[in-house]
Image (cartoon, helix red, strand yellow):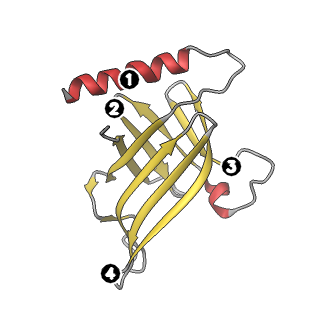
Amino acid sequence: MRLVCKGVFLTVLVSTLACRSVSEPARIAADFVLDNINGRPLPTFVSPIPEAPSIVSATLHFDRSGKVVTTELQRDMSQSEVRVTYTLDYRISGNRVEIGCFGPDSASALCVAGFSGTISGDGLSLTIGADQSVIYNYKIAPTL
């Protein structure tokens, strides 16, 4: 059953991207959940610096308007949990995705960094960080 769902999602994703005018940007409606960071299961650290938070969970919600809502549940050194949410823009070209701010109001530090990655099969891999050494690997969110 799970294999069928993955195949259906990929078919819908490909047909959604294919059925548009060449001048229109590619848009999807999809949800992803974080599976691992650099292959490490959750919760895990992003950076080995002791002050850096651990990531407990994260989600991405793409909508057809070109927006993506990113939500992370982080645990700090005192073991307190904080939910961090951003709404950013996304662009898709083939199987490549870019997340950031692409409009005239792109002055924030988060937007300057941006994220890029690849959609493949039932997942999405995003490169995070200035040196692009941190890879967030997402899976398609299970449907209820």
Callout 2 amino acid: Asp
List the residue tagged with mark 3: 101
Callout 4 amino acid: Gln
x, y (%) of residue 45? 34, 67
Asked if residue 2 shows in the view, the reply is yes
Q: Residue at x 54, y 21 (%)?
A: 17
- Between discs 2 and 3, the one toward the N terminus: 3
- Between discs 4 and 1, the one toward the N terminus: 1
Callout 1 amino acid: Leu
Q: Residue furthest left?
A: 1
**Disc marking residue 122:** 2
Looking at the rendered structure, the secondary structure element under dot 4 is loop
**Disc marking residue 79:** 4
- Between discs 2 and 1, the one toward the N terminus: 1
- Between discs 3 and 4, the one toward the N terminus: 4
Do tag 2 and tag 1 residues touch (Cβ < 8 Å)? yes
The residues bearing labels 3 and 4 have C-alpha atoms spaced at a distance of 31 Å
